[in-house]
Image (cartoon, rainbow, N blue to C red):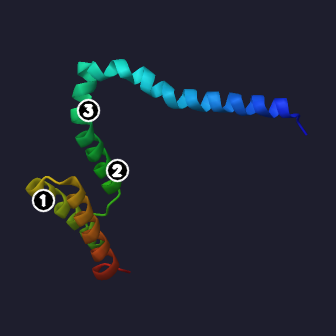
């Protein structure tokens, strides 16, 4: 069993490393907040990430089969509702609800 001094030093080292790892991103990113590139990316990346996620989720969708109707209908509801209301949370929740309702009732196997 290690002595008390060893345990205290181990806890202090662990605490210092944890604190440093949590504080480091804020210290490194602080100068980047004024960067024009970062500001440009912050306005463009959310849409780009959503497009990548949609492509990733629908890449293996068998479009010629009836089971593709639920995700495609959900996607149409999500896009349409977002274009109409401009509310991401509402759009995502409605699209998810449509997909779950169709997949668990109409197109359940």
Question: Which residue is disc 2 drawn over?
Answer: 56
Viewer-closest of 73 and 39:
39
> On the image, which quarter does residue 61 sit in?
bottom left
Instruction: Please give the name of the residue rendered at 27% of the width and 36% of the height, measured from the top-left corner.
Output: 45
Where is residue 54 drawn, in percent x and y?
29, 51
Location of residue 109 with respect to 54 vertically, above or below: below
Sequence order check, earlier mark of 3 and 2:
3
Location of the C terminus (image quadrant) = bottom left
Viewer-closest of 32 and 56:
32
The label shown at residue 42 is 3
Viewer-side label of 1, 2? 1
Give the alpha-carbon distance from disc 3 to disc 1, as whole Å: 24 Å
Instruction: Please give the name of the residue rendered at 49% of the width and 25% of the height, measured from the top-left corner.
Output: 24
Helix, strand or loop for disc 1 = helix
Location of residue 99 with respect to 28 vertically, above or below: below
Viewer-side label of 3, 2? 3
Instruction: Please give the name of the residue rendered at 20% of the width and 59% of the height, measured from the top-left corner.
Output: 91
Judge left or right: residue 71 versus residue 83: right
Give the alpha-carbon distance from disc 3 to disc 2, as whole Å: 22 Å
The label shown at residue 80 is 1
The label shown at residue 3 is none
Judge left or right: residue 19 versus residue 65: right
Judge left or right: residue 42 versus residue 1: left
Local crowd size for mark 2, using a 10 Å CA cut-off: few (<14), some (14–19), many (≥20): few
């Amino acid at each position: 069993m290690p002595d008390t001094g060893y345990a205290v030093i181990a806890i202090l080292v662990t605490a210092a490393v944890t604190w440093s790892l949590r504080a480091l991103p804020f210290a490194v990113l602080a100068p980047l907040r004024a960067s024009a590139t970062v500001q440009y990316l912050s306005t463009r990346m959310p849409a780009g990430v959503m497009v990548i996620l949609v492509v990733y989720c629908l890449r293996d969708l068998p479009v010629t089969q009836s089971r593709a109707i639920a995700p495609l209908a959900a996607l149409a509801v999500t896009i349409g509702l977002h274009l109409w209301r401009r509310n991401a949370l509402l759009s995502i929740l409605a699209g998810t609800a449509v997909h779950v309702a169709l997949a668990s009732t109409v197109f359940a196997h």
